[in-house]
Image (spheres, helix red, strand yellow):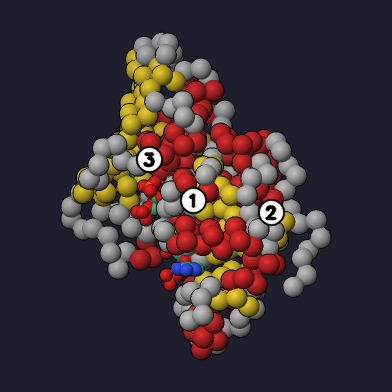
Amino acid sequence: MTKEPNKISVGVVGAGVIGRRVVGAVRLQPDMALAGVADVAADWRIAMLAKDGVRLFAASSQASQTLPDAGLDVAGSLEDLIAASDVIVDCTPKGIGAKNADIYRSAGKPFIVQGGEKHDVAGHSFVAEATYGSAFGRDATRVVSCNTTSIVRTLGALKRAGLLKKARGTLMRRATDPWESHLGGIMNTLVPEPTIPSHQGPDARHVDPELDVVTIAIKIPETLAHLHSWYVELNRPATKEEVLDAFAASPRILLIDGDSGLSALNSVKEAMAMEGRPNADLYEVALWSNILAVDGTELCYNYMVDNQAIVIPETIDAIRALASSEEQPEVSMRLTNKALGIGADELRL
Ligand SMILES: NC(=O)C1=CN([C@@H]2O[C@H](COP(=O)(O)OP(=O)(O)OC[C@H]3O[C@@H](n4cnc5c(N)ncnc54)[C@H](OP(=O)(O)O)[C@@H]3O)[C@@H](O)[C@H]2O)C=CC1
Ligand SMILES: O=C(OP(=O)(O)O)[C@H](O)COP(=O)(O)O
């Protein structure tokens, strides 16, 4: 397969909830081209990608049978996709990326895994605003989980403004993804995560070891998004305006006004649909400016994390960090934001 000149050739392994969104986002970047997708599934999800012109590769010997049996054209094996790619984005279910890492390393190809994998799989954890620079030119990185991404974005904004001392958060986690809610999830109950801290707080310190952050998580019976409630101790008394300015300085945090009617997860998703976002995806952390309170050094706020969407811009930036000559995080993030329509300036809200 011939590569498009001057474009980063991206191979995606595992095209489920995250992988198919990465496919869509890669295709919108001016400096990237999609080499194809390798998967083991051969159902409607993969058939729809094929109809969109995505080249399919069989990620297992069984898939090399089941894909053609389902009437789908197969361009080659996982190894063929790796050979045709400058960088691999592994979006397989938790634990499989760790096994695939050896294959990518043996092929000498840089790769990205997602937040279901442990930090050690890549030896580096990625959130663009914090660790683009240390990812630049590496052989691998891990885009941290959706909740962890939101924590680093928000606490990072407070830290850059010189305000952050320590943060304690309660994370209400959606039970399962919408498309598979008939297969699992919970109903008519709330389930506290069995350990304190939940993994997201410690995991945020893989990105920024200076963060003093503890998280507690609860699984809740809905599928739209996560909702976080934070108590933050500031290192000096601040005003509400100072705190809002600190958050507003990041284009990947969207201040929303509950008094305008955007008062819940579902209304924010509907607004994203009206914005014309694919899948009504909310790439930003949506933080309620009207439900934020500052009292001296005490700060409390709530925000929404669209778990299916928030890691997509980070993954695009991680591709540039590993496989392009762009060393400046701001340049990559601007390109990504523009291509995906991210940030208050890009929205009608
Ligand atoms: N879902 C979410 O909200 C978020 C997920 N993440 C992380 O992203 C990663 C992917 O999650 P998600 O998109 O939800 O997963 P999905 O289950 O939606 O998609 C995974 C895809 O990979 C396929 N697959 C399974 N095994 C292999 C294999 N060996 N080789 C190639 N493809 C394979 C699956 O096929 P099949 O279905 O047939 O098994 C499926 O098509 C995980 O690390 C997860 O923790 C991060 C942030 C948010
Ligand atoms: O990465 C996520 O959340 P997390 O930050 O709680 O690990 C995604 O919402 C996936 O979570 P899941 O492990 O419930 O599928």
Instruction: Look at 53% across and 20% down and name the residue there.
Output: 161
Q: Which residue is mark 1?
A: 121
User: What's the residue type where badge 3 is placed?
Assistant: Gln
Q: How many angstroms separate mark 1 from mark 3 (CA)?
A: 17 Å
- Of mark 1 and mark 2, the one earlier in the sequence is 2
Q: How many angstroms separate mark 1 from mark 2 (CA)?
A: 27 Å
* Residue 67 % position (x, y): 53, 82
Q: Which residue is mark 3?
A: 200
Query: Is residue 255 in view?
Result: no
Are the residues at dot 2 and dot 3 in contact (C-beta closer than 8 Å)? no
Q: Secondary structure at mark 3?
A: helix
Instruction: Look at 58% across and 39% down and name the residue there.
Output: 128
Are the residues at dot 1 and dot 2 in contact (C-beta closer than 8 Å)? no
User: What's the residue type where badge 1 is placed?
Assistant: Val
- Asked whether, in this view, residue 231 is left or right of residue 241, the answer is left
Q: Which mark is residue 225?
A: none
